[in-house]
Amino acid sequence: MTSFDTSPQPNVWRALLALAVVFVMLATTGWTALRNQKNPTALAASLAAWEDARIEGYRLPDPQAAPARLARFFASLTERQRTSLARRYPLAVGNMNGAPVELRYRANRIALGQARKVELKRMHDSRLTPDGQQDAGRRMHRFESLMSESRHILAFDPEGSGRVAEVFGNLDKADRVSVIVPGVDTNLLTFQRTQRRYSAPVGMAKSLYAAERAASPSTRTAVIAWADYTAPSGVGMDAATAMRAESGAARLNALLRGLPGGSPVSLFCHSYGSVVCGIAAHALPRRVADIAVAGSPGMRVETASQLRTSAQVWSMRDADDWVQDVPYLEVGGLGHGADPVSTAFGARVLSARGAQGHSGYFEPGTESLLNFADIGVGAYRSVHCAGEDEGCRADLSGTAPVGRA
């Protein structure tokens, strides 16, 4: 009589473990509630006003038109006309992929000023609880900081927890462009931090920009701290599914297709940001040369080839990063697939020495940051691979930055 092994297989146990983790998340954080908007948001109102407007008797183009179409429209205007549109519809122009970046900076400064006034009133609104007034104060101060003439805000939306993107360097003249895609708990208030500054998008971008300039002083670089998607709040259901990542991926691709020029672009995707990049990968424009993920819970695929991208795929994880304990699988929409640093995945695995945990990949002096900088300037021959294996540099060309082997 033939006997059959009915014991659970390892993958089954992993699936059960993943589901158990999810139920714990549900018990501790609950389902994320999405607010139903009864009134149009400030951005929606600005876009609606744009759609109803005319200039010199002609209707304005669809704000969701292809970036190239919008770029041609703005190029056809006088400086006075462009400035007038930015003043009348600051949120629309400030978030319009295809509009000149300098015009977007000016428009967003105006929009930030308007949002600051709203929060200033809320600070003294007796209908709000003390906590609500305090939150308004924090938002007001953040908007005030972002309004500084020295800051270049490429996108801004004050609604809800808020979205924002900031540029470091000259985006119009850059030889190489880097885009940082952050993970959970990213919003307007956490966009930059005084404590643990390199765990926040602004600190990450500043650190990478400085490292790229040190790696190759002759290469003109620009770095975008991109927090222009609604990231999950905490390690709950939203973080265990791709819902936030799917909408984020669409926004990321829209940004990339609206960037000026044709310089190579490198994506640096941290934590849940790597889920966003994984979903976006198949639709990325050809100018995206690299997708580098750090502390990734998965990219919604089993192998790098399934990303269907022409970009080089790099991955790294610090030995003390807690994300390695997350089950690397996807079951019924929960979980994010295979481990990007595993041999079977097929990415080029880099050293993250010195990163010390989940949030230290952009800390100055770490091998993770040096590797990111080399990728950002196209110096692929200078990257440090994980362990003793130098295979991450195989079949790659690139320049070695001054002072580096």
Image (spheres, rainbow, N blue to C red):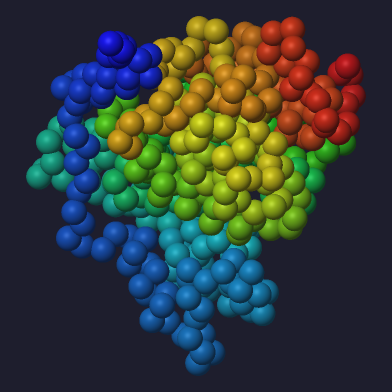
Residue visible at 71% across and 51% down in the picture: 287
Q: Of residues 285 and 232, which is closer to you in this image?
A: 285
Q: Of residues 395 and 355, which is closer to you in this image?
A: 395
Q: Is residue 222 left or right of residue 323?
A: right
Q: Quadrant of residue 363?
A: top right
**Is residue 224 placed above or below 102 in the rendered structure?**
above
Give percent across and percent down for residue 141. 38, 37
Extreme-front residue of the structure: 1
Residue visible at 66% across and 75% down in the picture: 72
Extreme-bottom residue of the structure: 57
Residue visible at 41% across and 47% down in the picture: 246
Q: How many marks?
A: 0
Give percent across and percent down for residue 110. 46, 58
Q: Is residue 232 left or right of residue 388?
A: left
Residue visible at 82% across and 31% down in the picture: 396
Whether residue 266 is visible to the viewer of this picture, yes or no, is: yes
**Is residue 9 placed above or below 315 in the rendered structure?**
above
Give percent across and percent down for residue 64. 48, 68
Give percent across and percent down for residue 157. 40, 52
Image quadrant occupied by the C terminus = top right
Image quadrant occupied by the N terminus = top left
Q: Is residue 125 left or right of residue 365?
A: left
